[in-house]
Image: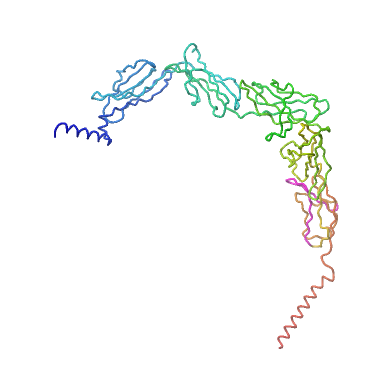
């Protein structure tokens, strides 16, 4: 075989070995890369770090070390460390390594390890505005100061980690903040291969958007008295200004029952109080607060009312007389005045009758039933589409309750039979206390609404009434009659005797045959 043929066959063998993954052949043709760890490290003051270098794959490699004093400076060999796989360094700088084989072949250089030292300086972090709470949609600015670092070019590192993007300015402003801006904030200065200590920690917690609480005093108007509105908010001295509004009934607003009109001089007041003079009719008010250079506004407060009991021709609420039914009493509330649309409103809103908050054309009539829950007690008034509030009426349903009814059989009851009398309360508490009287003498007082007789007797005859919730029922009379008369009592016995005699005679006749 000639020489050219041998070279061809050798080339084919090497090529096949390369594609088949032969490690020795790859070693001949591929150049490995040295691996250096760690690649980043900050030396504490007076501290050091161990750097290790390795080369993957087989073969004997002599490790060569290199260093540069700063970014952009020339890399110099560290001959004193030649052959060492790990070295200890205590100086800042850029370090790298590579391997050299016995035949003089070199690996690729490793990635550079950036080793920074720590300056004996601690950064100072401040926050503006320095409020106790920061609310969603507000803005805040953090500022990083380096003591004694004036006139030096610094870049800055920030925490939390999601904010570690390289920044050359010492301020960061966060606008329209949300949950993602929660965290413990810190900063440090970065100058080439030198770092300051991390700053103090400023915890930032973003709170829900704020809703102030409005109070009014007094709640009921009296002649000549002024009304004081107070807008209560957390930390009122932390940059808040206040806005004051009158609440106006509105048909077009679906989510809110009112629209708001700014009161005279009710814009950006520094005080948490606003005084109204000359108010004579029922009215509703709200407030809200604002602060910050991006004009953060709180929610509006819930409307609060000042009520007047005086009748007003443009809008009036009348309470009809109590109407009685067997199962309940009821009373009607009627809205009248200079409007074609009305609705009945109630405070508190813990339980709202079916007719409340509903706009009605013409007179609005709301029916309250005394058998309903006592949570329907409250202050009621009317509102019109012409922005009028009626007089207010404080209603306690108990005041319209005419009392229970004593339920007794209409016909006389038979002596010795079971009889049950009952007290129809017509309203009911969770744990009622019902008293029964017989001829004005108390005979039962507990939560039972029935008075039972297992075997009623003649002595149980008489007048009965019941008492519930401080009111008595009308008295009812129960009559007791004997169970059977004298003739009827002996008739069943005679019938049984006659049947027995007839049976015996039939048996005797059948035996004689």
- Measured as percent of width and height from the top left, residue 51 is found at 36, 23
Residue 452 spot, x, y in % from top left: 77, 56
How has the structure been colored for display? Answer: rainbow
- Of the pair 228 and 509, the residue shown nearer to us: 228
- The x, y position of residue 300, in whole percent, is 68, 29
Q: Residue at x 84, y 62 (%)?
A: 481
Give the residue displayed 83% in from the left and 53% down from the top. Answer: 464
357 lies above or below 454: above
Please name whichever residue, 235 or 224, is drawn nearer the observer in this view of the structure: 224
**Residue at 27% across, 35% down:** 19
In the rendered view, tell whether residue 494 sits above or below residue 46.
below
**Quarter occupied by residue 112:** top left
Report the residue that reaches farthest toward the top: 151
- Residue 163 lies left or right of residue 469; in this view the side is left
Q: Residue furthest bottom?
A: 513
Q: Quadrant of the N terminus?
A: top left
Residue span colored magenta: 417-439
- Find out whether residue 247 is within the magenta segment: no
Instruction: Point out residue 349 in the picture as x, y percentages from the top left corner.
Output: 72, 37
């Amino acid at each position: 075989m000639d020489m050219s043929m041998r070279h061809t066959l050798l080339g084919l063998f090497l090529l096949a070995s390369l594609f088949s993954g032969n490690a020795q052949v790859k070693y001949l043709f591929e150049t490995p890369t040295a691996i250096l760890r760690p690649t980043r490290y900050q030396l504490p003051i007076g501290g050091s770090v161990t750097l290790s270098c390795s080369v993957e794959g087989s073969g004997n490699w002599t490790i060569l070390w290199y260093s540069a004093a700063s970014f952009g400076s020339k890399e110099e060999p560290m001959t004193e460390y030649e052959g060492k796989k790990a070295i200890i360094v205590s100086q800042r700088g850029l370090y790298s390594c590579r391997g050299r084989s016995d035949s003089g072949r070199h690996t690729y250089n490793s990635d550079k390890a950036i080793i920074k030292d720590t300056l004996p300086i601690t950064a100072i972090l401040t926050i503006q505005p320095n409020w106790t709470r920061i609310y969603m949609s507000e803005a805040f600015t953090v500022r990083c100061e380096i003591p004694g670092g004036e006139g030096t070019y610094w870049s800055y590192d920030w925490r939390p980690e999601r904010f570690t993007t390289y920044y050359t300015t010492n301020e960061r402003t966060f606008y329209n903040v949300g949950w993602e801006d929660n965290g413990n904030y810190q900063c440090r200065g970065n100058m080439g291969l030198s770092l300051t200590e991390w700053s103090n920690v400023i915890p930032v917690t973003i709170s829900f958007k704020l809703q102030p609480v409005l109070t009014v005093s007094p709640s009921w108007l009296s002649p000549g008295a002024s009304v004081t509105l107070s807008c209560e908010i957390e930390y009122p001295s932390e940059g808040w200004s206040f806005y004051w509004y009158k609440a106006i009934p509105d048909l077009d607003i679906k989510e809110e029952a009112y629209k708001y009109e700014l009161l005279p001089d009710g814009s950006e007041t520094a005080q948490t109080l606003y005084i109204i003079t000359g108010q004579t009719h029922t009215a509703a008010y709200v407030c809200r607060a604002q602060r910050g250079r991006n004009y953060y506004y709180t929610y509006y407060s819930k409307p609060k009312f000042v009520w007047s009991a005086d009748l007003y021709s443009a809008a009036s609420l009348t309470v009809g007389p109590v109407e009685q039914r067997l199962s309940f009493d009821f009373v009607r509330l009627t809205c009248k005045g200079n409007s074609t649309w009305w609705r009945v409103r109630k405070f508190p809103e813990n339980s709202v009758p079916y007719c409340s908050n509903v706009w009605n054309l013409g007179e609005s009539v709301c029916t309250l039933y005394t058998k309903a829950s006592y949570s329907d007690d409250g202050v009621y008034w009317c509102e019109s589409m012409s922005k009028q509030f009626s007089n207010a009426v404080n209603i306690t349903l108990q005041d319209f309750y005419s009392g229970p009814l004593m339920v007794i059989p209409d016909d006389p009851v038979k002596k010795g039979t079971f009889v049950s009398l009952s007290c129809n309360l017509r309203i009911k508490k969770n744990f009622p206390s019902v008293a029964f009287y017989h001829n004005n003498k108390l005979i039962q007082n507990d939560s039972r609404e029935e008075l039972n007789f297992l075997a009623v007797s003649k002595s149980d005859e008489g007048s009965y009434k019941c008492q519930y919730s401080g009111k008595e029922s009308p008295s009812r009379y129960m009559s007791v009659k004997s169970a059977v008369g004298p003739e009827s009592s002996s008739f069943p016995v005679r019938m049984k005797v006659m049947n027995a005699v007839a049976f015996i005679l039939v048996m005797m006749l059948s035996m004689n045959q």
